[in-house]
Image: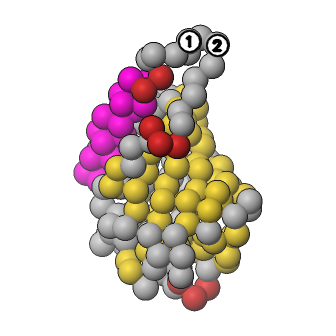
Amino acid sequence: MRKSLVLALTLSVVVGHATAIAADRDVETISIVQTDEMEWKDYPGLPGVKFVVLAGNPSQPGLYVIRAKFAPHTMSRPHWHPEARYVTVLKGTWWAGTGESFDPDSTTPIPAGGFAIHAPGKVHYDGAKDEEAIVQISGMGPSGTHVVNPGGAKKE
């Protein structure tokens, strides 16, 4: 519960910044966030993972879009989300596994261009192995991450 609250507060701060970036544009017509305007933040409790909120606010009801960047050899621990999450791999190979036992060797590779759906309430873990991986995640908030085996990210 505490980790979920910290994550929600952190995401709220980042969302405020994303709104400020778009303030100088006609956001009623189009919102544009250029790559060089993205401010990647450390993902709370997951060393080696950074994220940026591109649209919406994951802690509030409604659509959100975030990107997550996993450093090489960085994977999340088994966790679940209350909402469905739709994941597109933008860079590198992202590795996904299921179940409460953390076993990076049993993960499935998803190369750039690949797509995955995390079902709500289902335990999984994911991340990068030998190279950096960047994924784009969208869903309907409010979002949350509930770690099954506390301890944060694990370096392989």
Eyeballing the image, is 25 above or below 108?
Answer: above
Where's residue 103, x and y in %? Answer: 52, 85
Give yes or no for residue 108 being in the magenta stretch. Answer: no
Question: Is residue 155 shown to the viewer in this render?
Answer: yes
Give residue 88's quadrant in the image: bottom right
Residue lying at the far front of the rendered structure: 36
**Res. 29 mark:** 2
Eyeballing the image, is 100 above or below 8?
Answer: below
CB within 8 Å, label 2 to label 1: yes
The residue singled out by tag 1 in the image is: 26
Where's residue 32, x and y in %? Answer: 57, 28
Residue lying at the far bottom of the rendered structure: 105
Residue at 36% from the left image edge and 37% from the top image edge: 14
**What's the magenta region?**
1-20
The amino acid sitting under disc 1 is Asp
Residue at 45% from the left image edge and 38% from the top image edge: 37
Where's residue 107, x and y in %? Answer: 62, 80
